[in-house]
Image (cartoon, coloured by chain):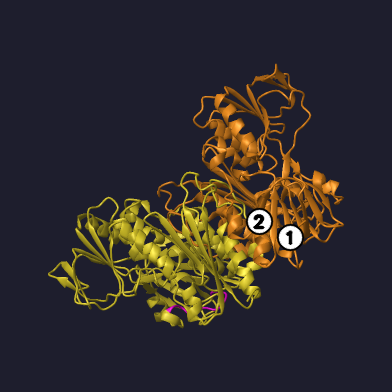
Chain colours: A orange, B yellow
Amino acid sequence: MMKTDVLVLGGLSGISAAISCKRHYPDKKVVLVRKEGTVLIPCGIPYIFGTVGGPENNVVPDGLLETNDIELITDEAVSVDKESRVVTLKNETQIEYSKLIFATGSVPLVPPFPGLDKENVFVVKKEFGYLKDVLDKVNEAKDIVIIGGGFIGVEFADECRKGRDVNVTVVEMLSSCLQMALDDEYCEEASEKLKETGVHILTEERVVSIDGGKKVQAVKLASGKEIKADLVILGIGALPNTNLAEKAGLELGFRKGIQVDRYMRSVSDNNIFACGDCAARSSFFDGKPSGVMLASVATSEARIAGANLFSPTHHNCGVISSFATVINGRAFGVAGLTERNTKANGMDVIITRAQATDTHPGGMPNSSMLKVKLIFSKDTGIILGGAVSGGKSTGELVNVIGACIMHHMTADDIVKFQMGTHPALTSSPIAYPVVTAACKAIVPIKGINK
Amino acid sequence: MMKTDVLVLGGLSGISAAISCKRHYPDKKVVLVRKEGTVLIPCGIPYIFGTVGGPENNVVPDGLLETNDIELITDEAVSVDKESRVVTLKNETQIEYSKLIFATGSVPLVPPFPGLDKENVFVVKKEFGYLKDVLDKVNEAKDIVIIGGGFIGVEFADECRKGRDVNVTVVEMLSSCLQMALDDEYCEEASEKLKETGVHILTEERVVSIDGGKKVQAVKLASGKEIKADLVILGIGALPNTNLAEKAGLELGFRKGIQVDRYMRSVSDNNIFACGDCAARSSFFDGKPSGVMLASVATSEARIAGANLFSPTHHNCGVISSFATVINGRAFGVAGLTERNTKANGMDVIITRAQATDTHPGGMPNSSMLKVKLIFSKDTGIILGGAVSGGKSTGELVNVIGACIMHHMTADDIVKFQMGTHPALTSSPIAYPVVTAACKAIVPIKGINK
């Protein structure tokens, strides 16, 4: 029987967890088992269909494993015996571990529409060969229907239109695309940008069936509408991939994620950890279960899990939820809570907005208008969330806000922020929108002039 | 006699201070007195000579004053009587104030070279008409010599080469350009980028005289070299502009900056505040006097001064020093201390480096390699500084690091950072260099494996 100190099951967050373990415990032997020969960059998957040209250009380099002295086994774990601490692979290899990490990710959520089994109906699996096939079919398609207007849905729609003479329609159940992620004004801006590419958006529409012969021909909606379709992509979300964990007798929590403690240890077994989309999560803010699935969360959890393996001392602070997307060249991002979230939570908040060009003067090349919205607790002045739309700097500006949230900064703290600026790289120092929005919050927080 | 609650003397940080005052004290009357009809964006000045095309495209919009109900008087304050709280202007107008803010900025540092009075020898004044004249002369020049290889010098050099068939030479006293701002490896990278534009760089060279007839013809160096020059720009630094403050009897400190307390109040008079380059500063780290002059610092001080006018409760934490520059399309930035600074301070530090493309996969369009260096205290694990070179996201990534420094985050905190990522906007979540560099610091900080 093979023996290892640490056995990691899974993909991207598995790599992060394994590297983290080797950093903290360089003498431990770490083995990573995964089904896929090649691991795709999850957030890069939509870009396979346009910008980067194919799955072969969206691969996580395995060099990371070699550099960090992590042994890779390409196989599927089929059972875990936690009493004897042995994992059995499909090829019947048995591996004895001291510590086991589940990083098995998520599987696409597939609602029970009739007609899902027709040809040219796809879900978004993170599998190289599968996606190569989807790409070939997208290249032949004339009428693509994307079910679900979340990130994956709108990014796919945007990419499918790139260099292709194809009808693309997004069908969304809610009253706008991206509504689970962004506040109304940003949803509106994003939808406008997507429409400019020629993508059709149908909102408040439910799919009742996927119709056709052997191959899909149409998507039928509850409103009675029927949309012509020779290819359908389902992008309505994902669920924790925890069949194996359940079989092993680990306690599952919210949405069947593996129940973990603050150290990312399974509550059922101190020698088993879980991180990434397969772990049950709770919110940084209210501590309640969170269905958020983001690389920002998964990789943070992975680093924490790896660090805690032989000395559990690193707390996971819970899901902040920081992310960004790009639609037709315009970037949108959020860190922390949206206005919608704070309302649903019954929080008394101060919301402020500011905008400025992301260069200064605005006449510098490649200038975009940067719009920022910040949300503060009325009682404490602590920042709860921020949203940004703008150009290329949007991604890192979201992370500036994320750092402020993680450390419970107040509007007062942000007012004092010494932000580095440069004409070609940032907004002007007297109009830097994150700071201006914080400045605007001071008066209402303090109740001045009220 | 005119009366006002608040009188602000000065340019850019004056505007910031005035706006901050109106935010905190909306009922107070605020008057801003400045010499210039038009205020230039200070950091945009080099770009007048290339990218933006002229000073008229690099102006701070006065709309900000109107919107915030701030009265503007274009004149020069010539005396301050702090006992009677009256400022007299050149046109003999007298203004009585309750609170006075000095935001008079800096003046170029001009060493006593013989020949400074020759035609076509310029310093970097923040004056519209003056710079318009410099631009006209630059457009006619054949051989430009820039004395001083700091930010201003290298940015000018880069811009002067844009669209012009002109020889540009930078003369620097130290062993490389930007040595006061960046560590050696970044100085080297920046110098290489600048040389690629055709700019000549002479290091370890001291100017002894500026030669010629009525007009400059050459610059003579201590090494004996003589460089042909029909135009010379001096960019070797600036000093606080505090003649008026000195005359008013205010105590001056380091480099003759106005001595202020933590609330940005002049130590000589509780009714007089100072902010921006005219104020004496101390370091965020060791509290010692700091000669740093940056928009990031000036505008933070201005916001703090404005907030404290009628209730001094907001502390200035001192100079962190966050900035960025762009040389030949490559961005360089620093937040906090450099390795050079920590060595000079005798600090026991851990220095780590990480790099990754600023998109993921690297094949996304407009991808640049992002290089990050972080410096942590060996004892406490607290971050002391960070340096970045990369593409457009460099500016805001410096601000992510700045936020971490301002709140004394440790390497452990940064390891847990939930950074939002996106293929087109940021590095990959498993290779995000700020986090990777923090991860690498953990082992040496904890003394593991040592």
**Residue B261 image offset from top left, x and y in percent:** 55, 79
Q: In which quarter of the image is residue A202?
A: top right
B198 and B295: which is toward the camera: B198
Report how far apart the C-alphas of labels 1 and 2 lie in the structure.
Answer: 10 Å
Q: In this view, does A291 lie above or below B296?
A: above
Asked whether, in this view, residue A30 is left or right of residue B310, the answer is right
A237 and A97: which is toward the camera: A97
**Residue A260 image offset from top left, x and y in percent:** 80, 56
Q: Label 2 crowding class (10 Å Cα cut-off): few <14, some 14-19, many 20+? A: some
Q: In this view, does A169 lie above or below B415?
A: above
User: Which residue is the site of mark 1?
Assistant: A4
Q: Give me the disc on residue A71.
A: 2
Asked whether, in this view, residue A204 is left or right of residue B74, the answer is right
User: Which of pointers 1 and 2 lies earlier in the amino acid sequence?
Assistant: 1
Q: Label 1 crowding class (10 Å Cα cut-off): few <14, some 14-19, many 20+? A: some
- Disc 2 residue type (three-letter): Glu
SS for callout 1:
strand
Farthest front residue in view: A1
- Residue under the point 41% across and 80% down: B255
Residue B34 visible from this viewpoint: yes
**Residue B266 image offset from top left, x and y in percent:** 51, 78
Magenta residues span: B257-264
Instruction: Using the rendered image, report if marks 1 and 2 lie on a common chain.
Output: yes
SS for callout 2:
strand
Answer whether residue B262 is magenta in the image.
yes
